[in-house]
């Protein structure tokens, strides 16, 4: 029996424009990805965005530890601003809901272009 290997996490970011930053994630994210995610978010934080959009359309799996890193970015955004999670898969939304982290972010579920 051959198990599928997990998809290595990757990220690309677009420059902060008009105070908004975009982080595009791909792959599977779990506790082993926390350092990777933290480093990427710290790079964005240093640019001082007022808004953060994280595109999850190509994320197949996200556990609670990785989700916590993403939503904790709201701590360095302006008061009342939460990270926006764009196109999260149903399993990602379920993890955020069950873990109680959904209230720390906004969801953009609109279909992509």
Image (cartoon, rainbow, N blue to C red):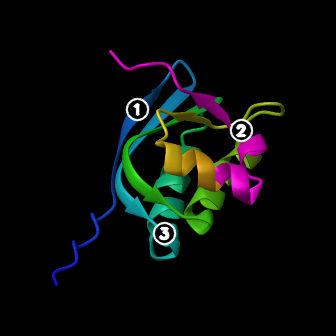
- Residue 108 vertical placement versus 28 (above, below): above
Which badge, 3 or 1, comes first in the chain's sequence? 1
Say whether marks 2 and 1 touch (CB < 8 Å).
no
Residue for point 44% across, 66% down: 36
**Which label sits on residue 77?**
2
Residue 62, given in percent of the width and then of the height, sits at 50, 59
Circle 2 Cα neighbour tier, 10 Å, few/some/many (<14 / 14–19 / ≥20): some
Say whether marks 2 and 3 touch (CB < 8 Å).
no
Quadrant housing residue 103: top right
Q: Give the quarter of the figure containing the C terminus.
A: top left
Residue 60 counted in the magenta span: no
Q: Distance of mark 2 from mark 3, alpha carbons?
A: 24 Å
Q: Is residue 12 left or right of residue 66?
A: left
- Residue 31 vertical placement versus 8 (above, below): below
Residue 104 counted in the magenta span: yes
Q: Give the magenta part as a residue range.
A: 96-113
Residue for point 22% across, 78% down: 3
- Residue 58 vertical placement versus 69 (above, below): above
**Which label sits on residue 30?**
3
């Amino acid at each position: 029996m051959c198990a599928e290997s997990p998809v290595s996490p990757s990220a690309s970011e677009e420059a902060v424009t008009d105070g908004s930053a975009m982080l595009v994630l791909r792959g599977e994210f779990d506790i082993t990805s926390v350092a990777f995610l933290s480093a990427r978010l710290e790079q964005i934080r240093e640019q001082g965005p007022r808004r953060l959009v994280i595109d999850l359309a190509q994320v197949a799996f996200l556990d609670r530890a990785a989700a916590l890193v993403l939503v904790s970015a709201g701590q360095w955004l302006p008061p009342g601003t939460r990270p926006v999670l764009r196109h999260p898969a149903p399993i990602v939304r379920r993890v955020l809901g069950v873990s109680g982290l959904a209230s720390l972010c906004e969801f953009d579920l609109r279909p992509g272009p």
